[in-house]
Image (cartoon, rainbow, N blue to C red):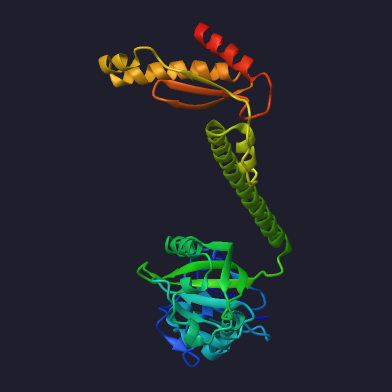
């Protein structure tokens, strides 16, 4: 059994890291401080005593070698453990999980083969570009970067990424930031998992889409109802104006699009009225008062007309003209005109 005792390891993601400027494996992957990524049978032990941490390698024959990790560089540590940096680079480069690093300005510094394969891009098409280009929701990815810059560790964050063929890939992101020895931000460390078969989330999304469509349909129906009501009011106003200008039968035929043929009436009764002294009245009072006077007078006379089978033809100045027996055939038009005149005088 081999056990490894390493200093200052925090399971929450606080792994030391180098500057991402160095690349290995043909420029495809930067070289992290790989010893910290190792785990052997027996796992990683803590150092509760607080003493100077040592590397303990237990061999099968019971013998032990103890050396201070502080006295060993990375290559020496790897050699002590029987690993090479190339082995670890190969491990992360060919991992079955999508991995990438993003710099301070959002530029993708490195991505492993799984990430490139999942999204369908070549290294040149992906690495060196802004991570924002490959996310559907630009606001969400900017918020993710902001939280990482603040030192927050993200777990299971949903996102949507854009495949090279234009399709949308739904993913979950686990990520944390790497800071150098001076505390300056170096890069992010992101693990991306595709969740296209995530049934619960898909169901929720389908519900949201259904609610959205229902809301849009309701809003459209409400808008159409408002348009119909306004149109109906305009039609009613036009018909009312038409009935004021023409006899009801003629107005109805015109509204229905029918042609109105000319008709002849052998007997009709006409009514004319004038306001006595109107010319002097109009010259001696302000125009506004004259208009108000005529409006009150004709409103009363219009009401009187509506009580009888007669038709108001026109008002010109103070003159008021009514006809009976013209808009419809009847033999009581003279009587109707007389009754109207008497009622108008009393009103």
Q: Position of residue 97 (x, y in %)?
A: 62, 77
Apparent side of residue 301 relative to residue 210 in the rendered image (left or right): left
Q: Position of residue 286 (x, y in %)?
A: 28, 18
Looking at the image, which is closer to me, 276 or 85?
276
> From this viewpoint, which residue is outermost toward the front?
266
Query: Compared with residue 101, is residue 341 higher up or lower down, i.e. above or below?
Result: above
Q: Which residue is found at the position 44% from the left and 16% from the top?
A: 296
Q: Nearer the viewer, residue 287 or 230?
A: 287
Towards the viewer: 89 or 268: 268
Residue 207, above or below 111: above
Q: Residue furthest top?
A: 346
Query: Is 82 or 283 nearer to us in this picture?
Result: 283
When asked about the image quadrant of residue 303, the answer is top right
- Let me know if residue 46 appears in the view: no
Vertical arrangement, residue 12 with respect to residue 338, above or below: below
| Viewer can see residue 122 | yes
Q: Residue at x 42, y 74 (%)?
A: 103
Left or right of 235: which side holds 30? left
**Numbered-mark total:** 0
Q: In the image, residue 299 lies at what x, y percent?
A: 49, 19
* Residue in the picture at 52% in, 11% down: 344
Quarter occupied by residue 336: top right
Q: Quadrant of the N terminus?
A: bottom right
Query: Whole-percent x and y of residue 288?
Result: 32, 20
């Amino acid at each position: 059994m081999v056990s490894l005792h390493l200093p200052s390891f925090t399971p929450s993601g606080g792994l030391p890291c180098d500057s991402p400027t160095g690349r290995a494996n043909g420029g495809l992957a930067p070289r992290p401080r790989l010893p910290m990524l190792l785990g052997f049978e027996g796992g990683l032990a803590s150092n509760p005593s607080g003493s100077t941490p040592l590397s303990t390698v237990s061999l099968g024959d019971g013998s032990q070698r103890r050396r201070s990790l502080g006295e060993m560089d990375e290559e020496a540590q790897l050699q002590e453990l029987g690993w090479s940096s190339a082995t670890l680079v190969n491990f992360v480069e060919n991992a079955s999980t999508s991995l990438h690093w993003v710099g301070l300005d959002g530029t993708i510094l490195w991505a492993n083969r799984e990430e490139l394969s999942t999204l369908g891009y070549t290294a040149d098409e992906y690495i060196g570009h802004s991570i924002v280009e490959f996310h559907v929701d630009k606001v969400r990815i900017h918020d993710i970067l902001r939280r990482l810059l603040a030192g927050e560790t993200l777990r299971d964050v949903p996102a949507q990424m854009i495949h090279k063929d234009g399709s949308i890939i739904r993913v979950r992101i686990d990520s944390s930031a790497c800071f150098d020895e001076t505390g300056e931000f170096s890069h992010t460390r992101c693990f991306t998992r595709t969740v296209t078969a995530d049934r619960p989330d898909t169901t929720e999304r389908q519900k949201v889409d259904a609610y959205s469509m229902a809301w849009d349909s309701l809003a459209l129906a409400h808008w159409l109802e408002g348009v119909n009501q306004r149109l109906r009011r305009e039609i009613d106003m036009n018909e009312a104006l038409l009935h004021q200008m023409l006899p009801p039968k003629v107005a109805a035929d015109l509204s229905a699009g029918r042609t109105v043929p000319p008709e002849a009436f052998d007997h009709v009764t006409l009514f004319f009225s004038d306001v006595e002294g109107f010319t002097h009245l109009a010259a001696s009072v302000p125009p506004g008062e004259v208009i108000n006077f005529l409006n009150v007078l004709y409103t009363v006379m219009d009401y009187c007309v509506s009580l009888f089978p007669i038709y108001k033809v026109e008002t010109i100045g103070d003159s008021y003209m009514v006809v009976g027996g013209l808009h419809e055939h009847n033999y009581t038009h003279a009587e109707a005109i007389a009754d109207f005149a008497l009622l108008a005088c009393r009103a």
